Image (spheres, rainbow, N blue to C red):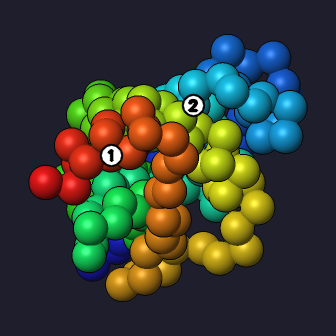
Amino acid sequence: MPVTLCNDWPLPRPGDPRSVLVNPYESADSPLGVEELISCLRQRWKATYDLQLVVRRQRLYLQVMWAYLEQQSFPMDESAYREHIAEVLDVVNRLGLATEVRRWLWDTRDKPRLGKALSLHLEVEGPEARNLLREFLV
């Protein structure tokens, strides 16, 4: 039985309105957006990986999972995926960690592999951010 492959997403090109590649060292303090994140994932790993927020031992982690949008078995369509990513990024941005996440995605040498997600411990500074973080650790 022949295997049908899903269409691969093209790499972002300069001038493409969907291409929102930002140098993480020049975009400090700006919120991380869905389009920027998707462009970064596609540029780095040629796939649009899923992101999850995970709580372990009273700590919050951002994980880049091994499943990706272009897989036939991926459980979400593109609009549901974008909504999910927007929810994850809303938490990251409200915690003030967009720059850290942006730099980590840019600099990490690892790649998500089947059964092995990439994990970033989300650490916050200041009393307001800690109070906000407690919402997610309940």
Q: Residue 133 carries which label?
A: 1
In the image, residue 35 sits, relative to residue 114, either above or below, namely: above
Exactly how many numbered labels are in the figure? 2
User: Residue 12 at x, y = what percent?
Assistant: 72, 35
Circle 2: is it few (<14), some (14-19), or many (20+) Cα within 10 Å?
A: many
Disc 2 designates what residue?
32
Q: Name which residue lies at 26% across and 76% down.
A: 57
Spatial CA span between label 2 and label 1: 18 Å
Q: Name which residue lies at 78% across and 40% down.
A: 24
Q: Which of marks 2 and 1 is nearer the N terminus?
A: 2
Q: Name which residue lies at 81% across and 17% down.
A: 15
- SS type, badge 1: helix
Please tell me which residue lies in front, 33 or 10: 33
Residue type (three-letter) at the residue carrying disc 1: Leu
Circle 1: is it few (<14), some (14-19), or many (20+) Cα within 10 Å?
A: many
The answer to whether residue 4 is seen in the rendering is no
138 relative to 32 in the view: left or right: left
